[in-house]
Amino acid sequence: MTSTGVTTDAQTDMQADAQAEVQTDVLVVGAGPTGLTLACTLARAGVAVRIIDKSREFHRTSRGKGLNQRSRELFDDLGVGEQAAASGIEHITLRKYRNGVAVADTVSFGDRTPTPDAPYASGLIIPQWRTEEILRGRLAELGVQVELGCELTGFTQDEDGVTGVLGDGRRVRAGYLAGCDGGRGGIRKMLGVGFEGKTDAEECMVLGDVRVDGLDPAYWHQWFDEDAALLLCPFRGSAHWQLQGVPERDAEGRLAPPSLESFQRLFDRCARIPGVQLSDPTWFSTYRINVRMADRFRVGRIFLAGDAAHVHSIAGGLGMNTGIQDAFNLGWKLAYVVRGLAGPALLDTYEEERLPVAAWTLDLTNERLRAVFEGVREAGVGTEAAITDDITTLGVGYPWSRLAAGGVNAGHRAPDAPCRLAATGEDVRLFELFAGAHFTLLGFGPDSAPALAEAAAAGGERLRTFTIDDHEGHARRAYGIEGDALVLVRPDNHVALSTGADAAGAGEVTDYLKRLG
């Protein structure tokens, strides 16, 4: 039948539906660890959020395979720490080989044990697909599902919000837009934000997920020879391992695409273990060292986080972790502004705090990669050269921020500690009190109660107050406190201010919360 060019009422309705605007507070683009963490943080705070991803199905690749100590703390705050721990490997043993012979074992953070102020002595080896699965489960509990097959193809913004256009023509109207769509994502490009840095075309490796039968999964096996390298990392409950290695090249020196056959040849060449077969590949990739950072993390009502804002060497495993920590920083601030608990100026502190951290991360990972290369060439050291206190990111803070109002440790991570609630005698950990979308005010000393009451009256729903019975002294030592004191902790578990437990101190807390807007 030939079209007459006449549009029926039903067709008009369908076209109108396709163009209809769907309202939400925040639209998150990209459902990797960064986007999922941000969506969880927002949904938990009561913010309407949609999260979309252009992929048509969830991936099952290992990719970023580690949660560091700080990310584990944040996962606890989100209520998924135990699930992550049950799926990961702590204190993994790195077994290093030279010329096919095992020469040394190094246990990741093997000399560390949990302390009262830092409950995790080790990060977790966990495949990225499982990390995302855990976060998606938490997000579903909060009433939000990832929308697959939804690509953002364009957007406009005005004083009141952002209008996004999807690939099928639908429009989404949101108060704010978060670009968590990766280093190659389109949001940063459409914004015209610079992404300065360099790509090293020569230094590259192949990666993949393969089944390995006959190799001991108690070790992260690492073979280093003069002209070849191969690493095979196991995962709990899986027969698949992540392979990293030097790529094959043809006679002209050009890279050959990774394949199961090339992986097997690399294994036979480096490991020299007869009878071990690699099989069932589920992912291949060629990785080039790419070190770049966006010159802005915010343009109006649009924010960049994770790989969309910064990419760097994999040394130290900080890529996914830095994105998760970006999202945790941004999430509470967006929630407060959307809910009217703070003024829009609070959003300026996201870039103010996280852009310098990204720059530091690029420098750190460059230096750690250099240490690994030098160690392999000169001293036979393996990837353990990348393991330093810095990669825990427990030391990352924002003392330069306008949100660091003064006193001991202002701007720095708020430590954990076992203590008691003075009102009930209940044994708690400080991290239990911090969990959620609120500020926490800790009162030390019996005379802090009036100041807590005064601050609570002014803080409203933004603030929870607790008088701490620090019977073992762990909290005072962690926070550098002597005598009666107040400590205000931000929703992302950084110290906002420390002050005296008197009327003047209560006034400082009240003024701080008022300055939020």
Image (cartoon, rainbow, N blue to C red):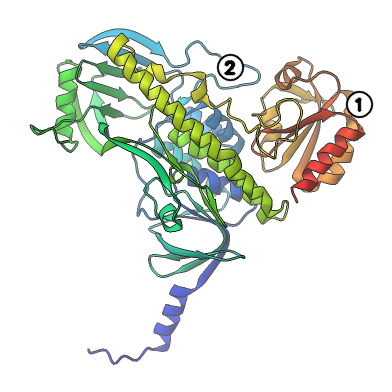
Asked if residue 379 is positioned above or below residue 214 in the image, the reply reads: above
- Give me the C-alpha separation between circle 2 and circle 1: 32 Å
Q: Give the left or right position of residue 2, taking residue 330 as reference.
A: left
Q: 184 or 132, which lies in front?
A: 184
Instruction: Identify the element where label 1 is drawn.
Output: helix
Instruction: Bin the neighbour count of mark 1 within 10 Å (Cα to Cα): few under 14, some 14-19, many 20 and up.
Output: some
Q: Residue at x 9, y 34 (%)?
A: 252
Establish if 225 lies above or below 64: above
Number of residue marks: 2
Q: Position of residue 329 (x, y in %)?
A: 59, 41
Q: Quadrant of residue 189?
A: bottom left
Mark earlier in primary sequence (2, 1): 2
In the picture, the quarter occupied by the N terminus is: bottom left
> Which mark, residue 114?
2
- On screen, 393 above or below 196? above
Neighbour tally class for label 2: few under 14, some 14-19, many 20 plus, Cα within 10 Å = few
Which amino acid does the dot numbered 1 rest on? Asp
Please give the name of the residue rendered at 56% of the width and 62% of the height, measured from the top-left corner. 174
Dot 2 falls on a residue whose secondary structure is loop
> Residue 231, image x and y in percent?
28, 23
Image x and y of residue 497, in percent: 75, 33
* Residue 45 visible in the picture: no
Q: Disc 1 designates what residue? A: 447
Q: Is residue 314 visible?
A: yes
**Circle 2: residue type:** Pro
Q: Residue at x 41, y 70 (%)?
A: 169
Of labels 2 and 1, the one closer to you:
1
